[in-house]
Amino acid sequence: MTTSYQKFDLKEVINASGRMTILGVSKVSENVLAAQKFGGEHFFEMADLSEKTGAYLANLLKVADAQIVSSASAGIAQSVAAVIGQGSLYHIYHPYTEKITKREIILPKGHNVDYGTPVEVMVAQGGGQVVEAGYANMCTPEHLEMMISENTAAILYIKSHHTVQKSMLTVAEAAEVAKRHQLPLIVDAAAEEDLFKYSEAGADLVIYSGAKAIEGPSAGLVIGEKQLIEWVRLQGKGIGRAMKIGKDNILGFTQAVEDYLTIGSEDGASMQARLTPFVDELNQIQNINAKSVQDSAGREIYRASVKITGPKNAKEVISELKSQSPAIYTREYQANNGIIEFDIRSVNALEMKKIIQRLQEIMA
């Protein structure tokens, strides 16, 4: 029996929540599947594959070097371990040794968020100790600077819609502080769409998710300064061993980056064009007020924002959308305000019709 929803008694899922890990993140292209198939059917010297694909991607992205890892979370942990160990083989085999005291990772307080797991968990996995700078709703270059000590190993900046957006210093400002104190700046840009911006802004290591904006298989990418990347790669002999990535996903992800740089992702104008008839149909359903809104972090992503006006509340509607097959997943961040958002990047026209039909049933 071939793989199917029925074989494993699984619900079909319509992903209107965005590129979310809990739903498998993205669909991959035929090009990427072909690269994965080649990887699955052949053998390689894995160290050579790692270095050569990294060099290939570094050339495409105009950086000194790159390393493919298993996920953006693994990228955080291995980058933290890299800047703490600085290439020490003793550290590789004893990553949490008390002999190394320079372990503090300075992070804006508003960036210490839970994105499925807390940022500080990944920092701790890499052997780092989070030191928060500033306040939940504000962090300036001065706030970062005042937390630097003789035990500071790096500055970490999380560029994400999960983090506080207002009154936060920019990546470029964080880079200026880092350079002034001869510290590496690590930027976690997991879901970001610009693969050049943060390196150009002065970050020493930048981390991306393979399966989000890039629409590749499960993977992560760390790009940056050559020595730092060599230290990240070295973690494969240490904590990175438990986070290793397979040959099929290395090649599939490399192809996904190449395609992404050539073809790009859906632009805002296209999203808005697809949203318009969807929003119009949503507004025909009783007790629903819908409009198109842009991503709160300023990315060129547009979604349908649906205000539920009763008698059912937004949380009840969300629960009912998930209850059947296909299970319809939405963005739930504003449910307490009576608002449900529909991210259509991974939703086709037929699935939009299914969403409309299901909402008509729920709201009737």
Image (cartoon, grey):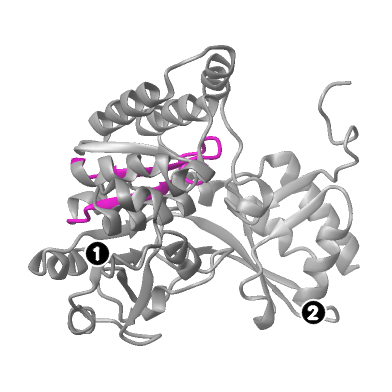
Nearest to the observer: residue 174 or residue 290? 174
The answer to whether residue 119 is seen in the rendering is: yes
The percent coordinates of residue 258 (x first, y second) are 38, 28
Q: Position of residue 80 (x, y in %)?
A: 35, 58
Residue for point 51% across, 57% down:
302
* Amino acid on which the number 2 mark rests in the picture: Asn
Question: Tag 2, which secondary structure?
Answer: loop
Q: Which residues are magenta?
A: 202-226
Residue matched to label 2: 313
Q: Nearer the viewer, residue 83 or 29?
A: 83
The residue tagged 1 is 171
For mark 1, give the secondary structure: helix
Q: Quadrant of the N terminus?
A: top right
Q: Relative to residue 325, is residue 348 drawn left or right?
A: left
Q: Is residue 131 left or right of residue 362?
A: left
Question: Does residue 88 sit above or below 152 in this rendering?
Answer: above
The answer to whether residue 164 is above or below residue 348 is below
- Please give the name of the residue rendered at 45% of the width and 30% of the height, measured from the top-left corner: 256
Outermost residue, top direction? 42
